[in-house]
Amino acid sequence: MADKRSRVNWRGYLPAIVTPFSDDGALDPQRLGAYLEWLLAEGMHGLVIGGTTGEWTSLSPAERRDLFSLVGAQMKGRLPIIAGCTSFTPQDSIELARHARDCGFDGILLTPPPYVRPSEEELFRFYKTVSDANVLPICVYNWPPGTGIDMPPELLARIAGLDGVVALKQSTGRLDLFVKTFFMLRETVRIFGFAMDEHGLTLLNGAGGDGTMGAGGVLGRDQPDFYNHLWAGNLDAARACGAKDRMILDQWYTPDLVGRFGSGPAVLKAAFAALGMPVGGVRAPLIDVDAHGRAQVEATLRQAGKL
């Protein structure tokens, strides 16, 4: 059990990417391919596919499989790729994980089943069932805004003890719970969710830690460079990169990571449009950011030196 961290090489900045759609709302392989190559060229340390930011909730099961097939064919072996396999049942997550494995993915990201708010014992059994299937390494995702559940550190420790669990993305809105979870589990599994601010930098530099997943890679190289500079010992350069990431979080999202003027995917897709990266709009029930929101997105990108 103690060597679970070494089973995967995940670390640094792994954006949870958007899913590009065509102008008529279909999954767009060409736009996806161009976006993936841009992310690779900008130095991302890995990619998370088909998560919340990737609008998995509006993808059909066939489209989720198609998305994994397209990404795997283009990116496997070039950098770590992690498949968002959140579902309402463990069997559905296992089936998605099997497809991701066959497509060359390195692991899966898995939140608690949304909407139904399982008990702690039900949550443990959910993750145990997926772990026991032994398909791909699992990154557990504690995502209170999307699931309505903020899993306590003690439950996360129990889940982290499962053999198939190698990582945790801790997205609690409470810094005290993040820190407690980190020190409880940092030697057991890889820990993601560090903010690119002074709190995160202090923890990462002084006590270790593995990385950050999120934000679609919208700032390009500045986001992975936060970690590249940190690893090289250049903390001032890391702070400068982190300040830009904090800028988009503070200006585009609430402290609970809910979009201020649109959903998370809609805000990021508006940003990519402003940057000249066509990824299409969002699918219903989400709606695209309006003109006022687009102006705020563009103002932030100018402030960050991206426009």
Image (spheres, helix red, strand yellow):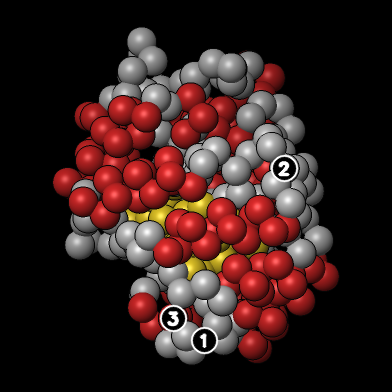
Question: Mark 3 touching mark 2, by CB under 8 A?
Answer: no
Can you tell which of label 1 and label 2 is closer to the viewer? Answer: 2
- In the image, what residue occupies the spot 48% across and 69% down? 165
Q: Nearer the viewer, residue 226 or 26?
A: 26
- In the image, what residue occupies the spot 66% across and 53% down? 122
Residue 17, visible in the rendered structure: no
- Going from the N terminus, do you reach mark 1 or mark 2 first? 2
Q: Nearer the viewer, residue 19 or 37?
A: 19
**Amino acid type at mark 2:** Arg
- Locate residue 92: give its quadrant: top left
**Residue 100 placement, left or right of 210:** left
- Locate residue 261: give its quadrant: top right
**Residue 163 placement, left or right of 298:** left
- In the image, what residue occupies the spot 51% across and 30% down? 57
Residue 157, visible in the rendered structure: yes
Residue on which the image places disc 3: 4
Q: Residue furthest left?
A: 73
Residue on which the image places disc 1: 233
Task: Estimate the x, y position of residue 93 in percent, counting from the top left.
Answer: 43, 46
Answer few, some or many: residues within 10 Å of disc 3's Cα (few below 14, many 20 plus, some between 14 and 19): many
In 3D space, how far apart are the residues under numbered discs 3 and 1 (Cα atoms)?
Answer: 27 Å
Residue on which the image places disc 2: 117
